[in-house]
């Protein structure tokens, strides 16, 4: 098995010479075999173990077992204990999902803080088959059916060449000690239900079932490469991006032969699940303003565009311009200048405001606009709601959220970058001009 382990690592380019690998060791048979293989190699490695406190004394026993096996060797080892049930309850997720989030967050933290290059898990071929069925039972695309990858970012799976029975045989031959997880024999978790009930039935139907399914997964991986190339071409037609958001052109999306698939592939990378993507797709022909959320991002439909941006939670901030200020650097760079009105020519640029200095009271303040704000747009005698002013200019909803206003007391002087208030314009009788440039 060691030779197959080395060949699999080389074939899949799992690691480069000199790289440090963090092994995730639970104490079970799979992870202890993985540890044994690394012990024989010349790879620089460390060990990380999580105690999820799900099986009482058994969980503590697993932790103690790994400590005894590892600490005496001098290999760097890291241990952490979690209240998994509490984490699951607080976050409204299953115990399995909670354990997954906790362990991967911990492994990544250890990796970064201790300069490991990669994280190795003990997944094997039977895990791949179980993952195939789990994804099949949910809503998934071709990516979900290709199962577990040998390498995904900084996560590597060096045992993916072996079956569970091969691992058991290797453990027996080399007298590798391990801890048996009693929950593996309980039909409680989804994987165990598949492992003990569903997959044995398929194997009874066809003894070559596992072998054939693994071959099917390999075929799907090849098909996925063709799919991804086509998808990238389609995405280039419909997506434009900036550093702060992704913009999907709805008209271009609807010209695609596969608009729903393209939309799913774009949004899924931002954490939107299949159900929400379906809702977004149905909204493409409806009115503007609908919003959809993943845990980290918001998708907002505005006219013929879909704007995807990261959710940011910020307190409302207010910035002040004192009478003696000539420059401001937050919330953006402003230059401030007082100029005699005689001979002054109005600068007609949206990023410049020319204001009658005698009409303002310092300190001026800069804040985000609010619902209910109103002003007197330049050239008008009546007042207008700022929200209606935005509608007239057809400003996208998500851009409205980033618009700042300059105020003198409770009066709006300037909707910054768009329009000054008529009450503060430079008039024939003006003696001094306050010029503010963004």
Image (cartoon, rainbow, N blue to C red):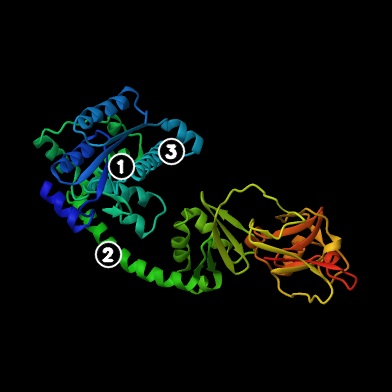
Dot 1, crowdedness within 10 Å: few (<14), some or many (≥20)?
A: some
Quadrant in which the C terminus is drawn: bottom right
Residue 315, image x and y in percent?
64, 47
Locate residue 379: give its quadrant: bottom right
The spot of residue 53 in percent (x, y) is 37, 28
Q: CA distance from mark 2 to mark 1?
A: 26 Å
Circle 3 residues within 10 Å: few <14, some 14–19, many ≥20: some
Provide the residue designation for mark 3.
94
**Picture coordinates of residue 397 (x, y %)?**
65, 61
Residue appearing at x 32%, y 41% in the figure:
191
Mark before the other along the chain sequence, 2 or 1: 1
Q: Secondary structure at mark 3?
A: loop
Q: Earlier in the sequence, mark 1 or mark 3?
A: 3
Q: Is residue 56 above or below residue 80?
A: above
Point out which mark residue 222 bears. Answer: 2
Question: Which residue matches tag 1?
Answer: 194
């Amino acid at each position: 098995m060691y030779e197959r382990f080395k060949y699999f690592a080389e074939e899949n380019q799992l690691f480069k010479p000199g790289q440090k690998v963090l092994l995730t060791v639970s104490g079970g048979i799979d992870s202890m075999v993985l540890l044994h293989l690394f012990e024989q190699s010349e790879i620089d490695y460390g060990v990380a173990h999580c105690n999820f406190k799900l099986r009482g004394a058994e969980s503590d026993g697993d932790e103690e077992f790994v400590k005894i096996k590892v600490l005496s060797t001098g290999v760097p080892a890291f241990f952490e204990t979690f209240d998994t049930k509490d984490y699951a309850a607080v976050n409204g997720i299953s115990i399995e999902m909670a354990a997954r989030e906790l362990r991967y967050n911990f492994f990544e933290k250890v990796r970064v803080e201790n300069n490991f290059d990669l994280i190795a898990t003990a997944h094997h071929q039977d895990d791949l088959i179980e993952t195939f069925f789990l994804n099949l039972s949910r809503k998934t695309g071709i990516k979900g059916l290709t199962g577990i990858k040998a390498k995904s970012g900084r996560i590597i799976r060096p045992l993916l060449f072996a079956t569970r029975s091969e691992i058991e045989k290797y453990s027996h031959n080399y007298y590798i000690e391990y801890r048996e997880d009693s929950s593996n024999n309980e039909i409680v978790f989804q994987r165990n239900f598949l492992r003990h009930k569903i997959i044995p039935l398929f194997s009874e139907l066809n003894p070559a079932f596992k072998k054939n399914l693994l071959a099917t997964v390999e075929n799907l991986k090849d098909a996925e490469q063709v799919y991804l190339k086509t998808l990238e071409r389609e995405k280039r037609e419909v997506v434009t991006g900036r550093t702060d958001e992704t913009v999907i052109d709805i008209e271009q999306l609807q010209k695609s032969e596969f608009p729903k698939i393209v939309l799913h592939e774009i949004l899924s990378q931002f954490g939107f699940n299949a159900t929400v993507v379906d809702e977004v797709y149905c909204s493409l022909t409806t009115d503007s303003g609908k919003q959809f959320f993943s845990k980290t991002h918001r998708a907002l439909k505005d006219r013929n565009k879909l704007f995807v941006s990261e959710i940011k939670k910020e307190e409302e901030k207010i910035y002040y311009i004192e009478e003696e200020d000539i420059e401001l650097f937050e919330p953006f760079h402003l230059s401030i200048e007082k100029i005699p009105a005689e001979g002054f020519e109005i600068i007609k640029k949206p990023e410049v405001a020319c204001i009658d200095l005698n009409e303002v009271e310092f300190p001026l303040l800069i804040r985000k606009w609010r619902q209910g704000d109103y002003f007197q747009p330049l050239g008008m005698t009546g007042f207008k709601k700022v929200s209606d002013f935005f509608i007239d200019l057809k400003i996208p909803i998500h851009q409205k959220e980033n618009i700042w206003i300059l105020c003198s007391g409770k009066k709006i002087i300037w909707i910054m970058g768009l329009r000054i208030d008529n009450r503060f314009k430079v008039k024939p009788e003006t003696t001094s001009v306050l010029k503010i440039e963004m």
